[in-house]
Amino acid sequence: MNVKNVMRLPNYLIWPFVFTGQLLATSLLAWHLLAQINFAYPTGYKLLDLDKHIAEFAPLNRHIHGFEFTQPADHWNLFAQITDAVQHDGKGLAEISFNLPNNIQQPLMHSAEIIHLQDVSHLINKFYIAGSLGAVIWIIFFLIAYRQRLIFPRARNIMLGFCGGIFIITSTILAIGATNVFYWFHTKVFPEGHQWFFYYEDSLMTTLMKAPDIFAFIATLLLVALIVIWGLSTFAMARALKNNHAPITAAENSPKIKSRSGKRSKRK
């Protein structure tokens, strides 16, 4: 019995772990990279006409007044502070504020908004854990595939699986309604009793983001970034396995050649 064959893992076990780990890891990388540029909020700000939205709803806020006097640069800076806080376990959320015309600092959010963003931060922490575990799984099983000199699956099959999965998920979301999915998701992932829905008149946080519109913009950016990172990493894996798959491997795995070599050994 060949010891190497005993230690080999079957292909059908290796590739699901490779691609699942890759998807988790590349999703996390896409998120992390976009977080460094605050999810291109200034671009979304202009595309979604957030200046007009803020000018309309800021004066109507029932809790905090004076936000209508702020400028676009202030809005970009406030969103950047929120992004930084939720990326770091919610630290600094309560300190986020803006200046009134008389230079008095006014807190941007009330307690319910701060609690909600802390919940968001805890969810992001879990995402980082899942993505990091995915990266470990990806590396381990790809190294196994590399060591076993496996042939990379056909690009056509991979693209069909990846694009097919995105198509099914996107079609399902559109069929149900992006807003309905957004609200359902919130009811499942956030603690019961914690407020997560805010009217524009009750939340400068929601007004600043024109939620949920800004999340559709961010989701589009994440999808584009994911496709690029996933595509590049898939190409890199295929190239690595192709270079590792020496011509002699095919000869060693050919039954006919093994049979002939066996006959020669008998003559000796």
Image (cartoon, rainbow, N blue to C red):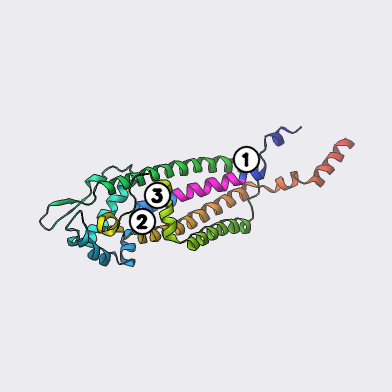
Amino acid type of the residue tagged 3 in the rendering: His
Q: Which residue is mark 3?
A: 32
x 30%, y 46%: residue: 85
x 19%, y 58%: residue: 67
Q: Secondary structure under badge 1? A: helix
From the top left corner, tell me how far across and down residue 61 is, in percent. 22, 58
What number is the disc on residue 147? 1
From the top left corner, tell me how far across and down residue 40 is, in percent. 34, 59
Q: Identify which residue, 116 or 85, lies in the foreground.
A: 116
Q: Nearer the viewer, mark 1 or mark 3?
A: 3
From the top left corner, tell me how far across and down residue 29 is, in percent. 44, 49
Left or right: where does residue 36 sit relative to residue 151? left
Circle 1 packing at 10 Å, graded few (<14), some (14-19), many (20+), is: few
What number is the disc on residue 121? none
Farthest-out residue, front: 193
Left or right: where does residue 236 sit relative to residue 39? right
Circle 3 packing at 10 Å, graded few (<14), some (14-19), many (20+), is: some
Q: Earlier in the sequence, mark 1 or mark 2?
A: 2
Q: Which residue is mark 2?
A: 39
Amino acid type of the residue tagged 2 in the rendering: Phe
In the rendered image, the quadrant that contains the C terminus is top right
Q: Spatial distance from mark 3 to mark 2, Cα to Cα? A: 9 Å
User: Which contiguous range is marked in magenta?
Assistant: 15-28
